[in-house]
Amino acid sequence: MKLLHVAVEGCGRFGTPARIEGFGPGVNILSAGNEAGKSTLFRAIRTCLFERHSGASKEIAALATEGLSLPITITVGFEQDGKTYEITKSFLKSKSASLSCDGVVTARNAEADEKVWDVLGISHRSARALDEAAYGVLWVQQGHSMNVPEPSEGATSVLNDVIAQEVGTLVGGERARSVLADVKDELSKLITETRKPRANGPLDMALKENERISAERADVESRLRDLNDRYAALEQLRAEHKRVHDPAAAEQMTRELAEARQKHEAAEKAAQALLRLETEERHAHDRLVSQRDKLDALRKRATTIDENRVRLKHISAGLLPLAEQEAEARTTLGAAVAEKSARDSAAEELDLRERELMLLASLAAKLSQRGALAARLGLLRDFRSRLAMNEAAIKAETVTDATIKTLDTLEHEAETLRARIDAAAARLTIEARPGTDVEVNGAMVEGHVARAVSEPLTITVGSGVTLTVSPPAATLAAAEDGLKDRRVRLAALLSQHKAASPTALRQLRVARLRLEEEARDLRAERTALSMTDAPGAEIEKLEAAIGEIDAEARQALAANAEVPTAAELDLQKQKISERRGELRAERTRLEAIIAGQNAALERIAKERGTLDGQLREINAKLEADLAVLPDEGREGFIAEAQVEVGLREATHRGKAALLEEKRGEAPTAEEIERLTSRAERLAMALQNRAASIEQLNQKIARLEGEIQTAGGDGLGERASTLALQQSVALAEVQRQTERMEVLSLLRNTVEHCYARRREELNAPLRRHLKPFMNDVFPQADVQIGENFAVSGLSRSGPGSELFGRLSLGTQEQVAVLVRLAMGAMIAEKGADVPIILDDALVFSDDQRIEQMFDAINRAGKRQQVIVLTCRARSFASLGGRQLQIV
Amino acid sequence: MALRWLTLEALLYHPVKMRFIHTADWQIGKPFRNFGAKESVLRQARLTAIETIGKLAQQEAAPHVLVAGDLYDNEEPAQKTLLEPLERMRNFPAIAWHVISGNHDFHRANGLWDRARSLGLPPNVHLHLAPEPVLIGDEAMLMPAPLRRKSEATDLTEWMDQAPSAIGLIRIGLAHGSITGFDSSGDAKNTIAPDRAARAGLDYLALGDWHRSMEINPATWYSGTPEADRFNSQDIGQVLLVDIAGPGVPPAVTPKRTGAYHWLTQAETLARADELEGLEARLRALPNLSSLLMRLDLTGTLDLTARADLSHRLEALEAAMFWLEADLNGLHVRPTLEDLEQIDFGGVLREAAEKLKEQAENPTASAVERRRAEDALVQLFVLTRGRDGGQAA
């Protein structure tokens, strides 16, 4: 294919129709500045040739002119196999396509899309593949010139086809690559690059299914085990139930219980009969003892009666001397009591006199303090007087610091106003020469005088001249108003404090300061006088104290001729004390006498009371005993009781003999206890048995319920199904794993063989590359790796340099040369495509770029090469046809 | 049921004879997941077999059907599974179905048989879950030996030796297990003495457990399953129609087909491509392909072309049969020169094919490695053959 012309509209910066003309065989160069739209134009060529007109990909949309709603219209003219074609396509809006051959339209729309591919010999697989296959390889896109070609799938096919034509089918590279692609595709459905199962792929799904089944199976089998455990437990319980529920054993136990109860009942009856006999025997014994006691009592009572009669005689004889002793003691006691009463009266009089002496002593002490109190009273009265005068004076003097401050402010403001008037006033200067009479407001002026005219001035010069100078009326009035205000406020201040002048006011302030100093002195004096209350209250307290002392003195003088002295008082006190001691001694003696007589009387009363009591008691007892056992018939009563004792002894012996006899026949208490215990044990055993059966019934019922619940959902069947299902799942895992292994083996084997044949596969490209390399890098050789990738460069020496470590310029040059070689290789087979270099060789120096121009021109001999550049001067020596955008 | 003594007079004027159907191993509820979507069909077929038995009993005027265990496949079936065979038996009210438990559906308290009872057994279904003699009809005494656990260590039929019976009654044993010595491994469970019938004076011992009809001795038979369920066992399901003319008279046993599906296992050895045609023809000639389940074990060696051809033929046969399960593990591939040329005359793929061939034939490689190399070779062959640019002649 050779491009002939390109026209665009609504495309990139070309909103209006634009066209590139001048294409020809060989090298073509389009020099234009940046942003001229070179790249846009060639993207348009690619789009027009290889995109369907109905497409709306991002690449197509990116071509549209911004701000215009025009369709993208592209026309490409080209020559192929001796015929001239023109393809025109409108994208995005008013979509259409039209292909003409030698001026005749041969296809439209979709047909035109595909027919142009047929003309170019490109498969229809996809627009993308077309682009990459026919153009991507040989298009050095702006900014990518240093990148080595990375042919896409389609592009590789094109290259491989060309190579296959040259090296024949012996290498089979394209077939191998195609098979390998299919194998990898199949393998990629199973595993990832890292050999992990591909998510949602067949292997992954099989593994997941197996995991899912495993989990469910584990759950179901666990539940099934639980169920079987319950069955086992149920079987055990039923066996236990059968054992416990044995009717023969139950009957045996019931029979034994009945026998035990029967024996126990008989034993109980025998025991009760024995108890009754024991009661009767005890009763007979009690009656015997009672009668014996009665006989003893009669005998004892008779003895007591006789003894009490003897005691009565002895007590009556002891009462006579006690009456005489009592009368003597009462006489002595009366005399001692009277004497003690007289001594108590004397002591009371002494106490009274002693209290009087104490009062007199207190009065004497107070009188000795009265003088001091009177002196303090005088001082306080004087202080109170001075204090009152000071307070009155301070109250009268009202001039404070604030008053003086107000006065100062008013005077200062007035002075300021006056100064301001003077400053604003005109200045009058008079120079009175000697001998000239000059008066100002009547005052004579001599020499030099200067003053402000702040008020009307009358100047008289000599007797004949009188001048009057007045300040401006308005200025004067304003100043006067201020001064007048100050004067009024000053007068009010003076009047408030009753001062004639500011000086007087200040004197009043001095006087007040003096009074304040005096007040401070009075407060200090008050502190010195130790006054806790106000002076008036203190004075009143002192007056009351003095009055009280005087009153007491008057009262004492009224009772005594005079107030005794302290010595006199002490003497009197001593006498009273001595007399009191004497009285106390006598009183103590009398109290001892009284106590002794009282004790004697008490003893006598006690002895007589005791004897009287004994008499009453013996008489009462004697009377009672005689009532029971009178003297007459005493012997008869005793004999009768004696006979009754004999009868009861006989009865008791009979009962005791019968009891002894029955005791030998009846069961012992231990036997009865044993029988009771056995009956209870057997009854308990039967109860326990019933309870056990009930418990077992409940457990069995519960287990049956659980089994019914658990077994009803077909657990066993489910487990069986899952087991089989898992074996199927495992087989599928195995199958997919095996398939993966087989595909991996196939891939590895083909890849290995492919690598071994790489040199043969790359030989055609190397052959075509050699002349181009010779133009730029003589003696150098390029290492071509997998998929036509340039891996290194050998220049001088045995070693080679890695492509990535070459300078950017060298990388760029080698990459462009490889493309030129690829183009030459394709062109040689008659399927040439244009090589388009869009702003390539940007890193090349002057010398190297010249060599690259040689290589490009070499390529241009066989095919069309289109160079787009913004560096017109650098590319001037490239030669070739100049293209223009019109 | 109390035992009755027949009088001599009764015997003279009413000679005793007995006809019944002997079956076993229905294994209702057995899963067939390995058959994919066909599972439901195979499960349904086992239920249909019950109806077939019922109809056969009616046709043959056999009033009793003895089921010698394993009516169910599992001791804990789902409710629906539990009910399905009972309901089918209910549909034949004139037939008395006598059932014992087997190792798959052994009896235990509150187990599946108690569940079945609680759901309400059809009146014509008689469960014999205890080793007690039971009169069936006026002619025979049935001595069942039900299993009460999956694996019994003792011979459950032993009690029959001492079991009394009335003079003139036919004695029939019903049991489930392995005849002693049947299992070559020697660890068989639920064993039954092979001479039990003779020892216990049984006129017939109806056995279950073995899924293939088999005569142990003239009076001892395994009925087999009424619907086959596995390869390498009974090809097609059947039951036994048993006639006993009287006590002490040898029974007349007639197998009767009841199965709908034919389970066939076939082994074939292949050596040449031209044998494929014959193999396919033989398989296609089998009767009722649509109800045939086949396991095809293939051995031998084929070239790549024939191997690919075999795959196509098997695909077609798989569609023709109810189920085809081909085991190709024993079938090896050895590429011919033509095979290799079909892959490529030279170049990368040819070299790869040669390497794989070498690996497939490498005696030092493991069997798995050799098998994978063969499969990879087949894969390569298929991929290249289907390619436009292939070298196919």
Image (tube, helix red, strand yellow):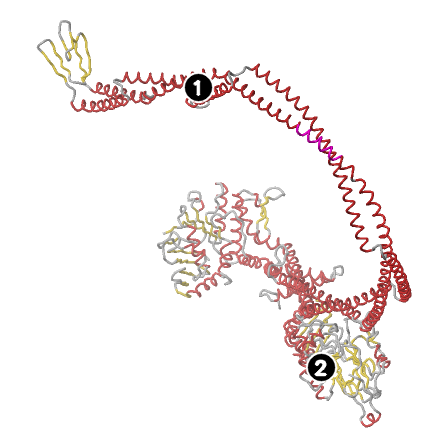
Q: In this view, does A440 lie above or below B386?
A: above
Are the residues flagged by discs 2 and 1 from a single subunit?
A: no
| Residue shown at 58% from the left, 44% from the top | A779
Q: Nearer the viewer, residue A601 or A568?
A: A601
| Occupied quadrant, residue B193 | bottom right
Seen in the image, is A111 located left or right of residue A406?
A: right
Label 1 resides on the chain identified as A
Q: Which mark is residue A526?
A: 1
Say whether residue A334 is magenta. Answer: yes
Magenta residue span: A325-338
Q: Which of B154 and A176 is in front in this view?
A: B154
Give residue B155's position: percent from left, percent from top: 83, 74
| Occupied quadrant, residue B181 | bottom right
Give residue B58's position: percent from left, percent from top: 70, 87
- Asked whether the viewer can see residue A795, the reply is yes
Q: Main secondary structure of the magenta part?
A: helix
- Asked whether the viewer can see residue B376, the reply is no
Seen in the image, is A777 located left or right of residue A668?
A: left
Seen in the image, is A269 located left or right of residue B92?
A: right
Q: Which amino acid does label 2 sit on?
A: Val
Q: Residue B56 carries which label?
A: none
Say whether residue A636 is magenta. Answer: no
Q: Which residue lies furthest to the bottom in this view?
A: B13
Q: Is residue A644 above or below residue A555?
A: below
Q: Residue B125 carries which label?
A: 2
2 vs 1, front mark: 1
Q: In this view, does B221 lie above or below A340?
A: below
Give residue A478's position: percent from left, percent from top: 20, 24
